Amino acid sequence: AQSVAQPEDQVNVAEGNPLTVKCTYSVSGNPYLFWYVQYPNRGLQFLLKYITGDNLVKGSYGFEAEFNKSQTSFHLKKPSALVSDSALYFCAVSSSASKIIFGSGTRLSIRP
Amino acid sequence: GAGVSQSPSNKVTEKGKDVELRCDPISGHTALYWYRQRLGQGLEFLIYFQGNSAPDKSGLPSDRFSAERTGESVSTLTIQRTQQEDSAVYLCASSTRLAGEGPDTQYFGPGTRLTVL
């Protein structure tokens, strides 16, 4: 069975500092990995995805994520955080034959 | 339309009543998902439709919950005899499938906020 874990409920970062939001997964076969963001009182928005190819994936709003097969991780990163990045972030995983499932979410708080 | 739409946007009902939630996916998207999100919580998978295949109902929390989809179009999620614990935002998403491979990006609707009094 596939699963995805976001081990941190909350991540706090000062504006301008780099940020990392962690995600690990377990699937049978090749993984399809996604990050979504949910701003307050708004719907979920797609940030980036890994299907195949380069392990470093670049997405919207300056975010990127690195696929690490040996560690089964797909951590979300940004070199310099903005206060406007404060939101709820979800990692999601699937394989070729299965549905997409979501992690429990990580609340990112960027302080000025 | 250009995106996934859901109706109603808000629904307040009394305990014990039935409710029906609607999702209009993006045209051409073969996959459709329903999720439930309780306040401040993550996304709880409910049901997944993929083309003409039998739906994956493994996430439905009880037999009070059911969903239908006609072809690759509209889907309805029905909750019978609603309970207070059913109060949540119900999200619908649709996606394509990459040719011969896995799912592509999901596009989410704005959700239906259900309040059961």
Image (cartoon, coloured by chain):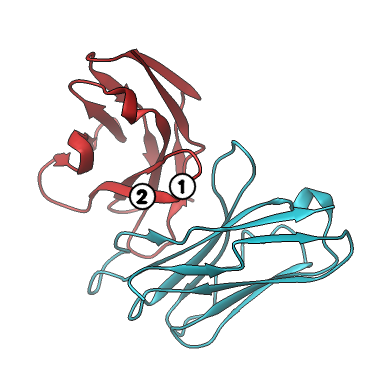
Chain colours: A red, B cyan
Q: In the rendered view, does A24 fall on the left or right side of B115?
A: left
Location of residue A102 with respect to B71 vertically, above or below: above
Q: Residue at x 29, y 30 (%)?
A: A71
How many tags in the picture? 2
Q: Does mark 2 fall on the same chain as mark 1?
A: yes
Location of residue A84 with respect to B37 vertically, above or below: above
Dot 1 and dot 2 residues touching (CB under 8 Å): yes
Q: In the rendered view, does B86 fall on the left or right side of B29?
A: right
The image quarter in which residue B72 lies? bottom left
Location of residue B71 with respect to B12 vertically, above or below: below
> How many angstroms separate mark 1 from mark 2 (CA)?
9 Å
Q: In the rendered view, does B45 fall on the left or right side of A26?
A: right
Res A27 seen here: no
In the rendered structure, which amino acid carries the disc numbered 1?
A: Arg
Q: Residue at x 79, y 67 (%)?
A: B64
Residue under label 2, please give it: A45
Residue under label 1, please give it: A42
Residue B103 coordinates in the image, percent (x, y):
32, 64
The image quarter in which residue B11 lies? bottom right
Q: Residue at x 42, y 32 (%)?
A: A87
